Amino acid sequence: MKISIVYNGDPAETKVVDQDTGEEIEGIANVEISIDAFSAYAAIVLQDFTLNAENVPGGILDEKETSE
């Protein structure tokens, strides 16, 4: 999937959409964009998502473990 970040000058109206379908991607909590002279990066923070991960070292912490 290729995505587009659509910004019209009003942060409240910023959208992240699927380039192929034009549909807005739900569950985006935040988008941060960093641009310098040689590159640009976008970090998209998701909320209410499902993660399927195999062969990934580490573990998943529940909320209580991260707030103590």
Image (cartoon, rainbow, N blue to C red):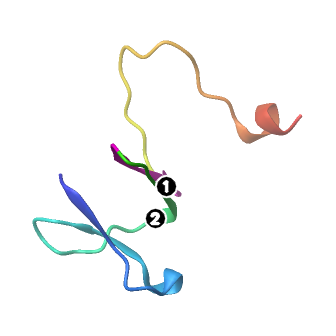
- Magenta region includes residue 47: yes
In depth, the one of 31 and 35 nearer the eye is 35
Check if residue 64 falls in the magenta segment. Answer: no
Q: Is residue 19 above or below residue 10?
A: above
Q: Earlier in the sequence, mark 1 or mark 2?
A: 2
What's the mark number on residue 46? 1
Quarter of the image for residue 44 reads bottom left
Q: Quadrant of the C terminus?
A: top right
Residue 34, image x, y percentages: 47, 53
The disc at residue 27 is: 2
Above or below, comparing residue 8 to residue 18 in the picture: below
User: Marks 1 and 2, how far apart in space?
Assistant: 6 Å
Please, is residue 55 above or below residue 50 in the view? above
| Start-end of magenta stretch | 38-48
Residue drawn at (37%, 34%) of the image: 52
The image shows residue 24, relative to residue 52, as above or below, that is: below
Assign a secondary structure to mark 1: strand
* Mark 1 vs 2: CB contact within 8 A: yes
Secondary structure predominantly adopted by residues drawn in magenta = strand
The residue at 35%/20% (across/down) is 54
- Residue sitting nearer the eye, 12 or 60: 12
Please identify the residue farthest to the right as the structure is shown. 68
